[in-house]
Image (cartoon, grey):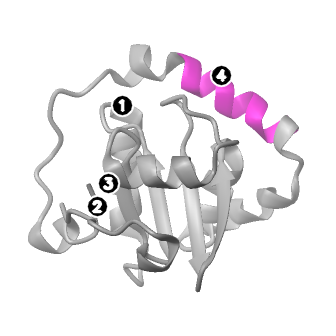
Amino acid sequence: MIPLMDTSPENLPPRLVLYDGVCGLCDKSVQWLLDHDPEGTLRFAPLQGPTAQAVLERHPSLPRALETVIFVEREGETERVHVRSHAIFHICKHVSGFARALAIFRFVPAFLTDLGYRLVAKIRYRVWGKLDQCRVPTPDERARFLA
């Protein structure tokens, strides 16, 4: 995990996934993304860490709940922030395989796609559990995680 001292927008990676660091489903999803990100451009940080807190401070309208995945796309000093189902659909633009097709759903209104997202978020700990520890990432994978 890379500590990020300066969390200003221009110092964040271009594609950052903020996820619940203790959620079993989130952990499995991050592992899947690591395996299906052909260019290795996605970076990851737990919502419980300082990188996520810096993003949340810059965007006070973002939900603070741990069940909300957040995807930050940065171009220069401009940050586009996507939450819940639309975060997932925007992340899918950067993966290989069948999941890339899910990116088309980013054009469907969030109030519709978030219905399914919220249902899964509500039961995720019961179905996939909470983690005390995660799989130890390889050195290459470790470089893709921020504090």
What distance separates the C-alpha of mark 4 from that of mark 3? 22 Å
Label 2 neighbour load within 10 Å: few <14, some 14-19, many 20+: many
First in sequence: mark 4 or mark 3?
3
Query: Which residue lies at the image location 71% right of the left edge and 64% below the top edge?
Result: 103
Q: Regarding mark 1 in the picture, which secondary structure is present there?
A: loop
| Magenta region | 112-122
Residue 57 pos. (x, y %): 53, 48
Foreground: disc 2 or disc 1: 2
Q: Which residue is mark 1?
A: 23
Q: Which residue is mark 4?
A: 119
Badge count: 4
First in sequence: mark 3 or mark 2?
3
Label 4 neighbour load within 10 Å: few <14, some 14-19, many 20+: few
Q: Which residue is mark 2?
A: 146
On screen, residue 55 versus residue 32, left or right, reads: right
Would you place residue 127 above or below residue 40 in this image? Answer: above
Q: Which residue is mark 3?
A: 31
What distance separates the C-alpha of mark 4 from that of mark 2? 28 Å
First in sequence: mark 1 or mark 3?
1
Q: Quick check: is 110 in the magenta stretch?
A: no
Q: Quick check: is 115 in the magenta stretch?
A: yes
What distance separates the C-alpha of mark 4 from that of mark 1? 15 Å
Q: Are discs 4 and 2 less than 8 Å apart at CB? A: no
For the stretch drawn in magenta, what is the main secondary structure?
helix
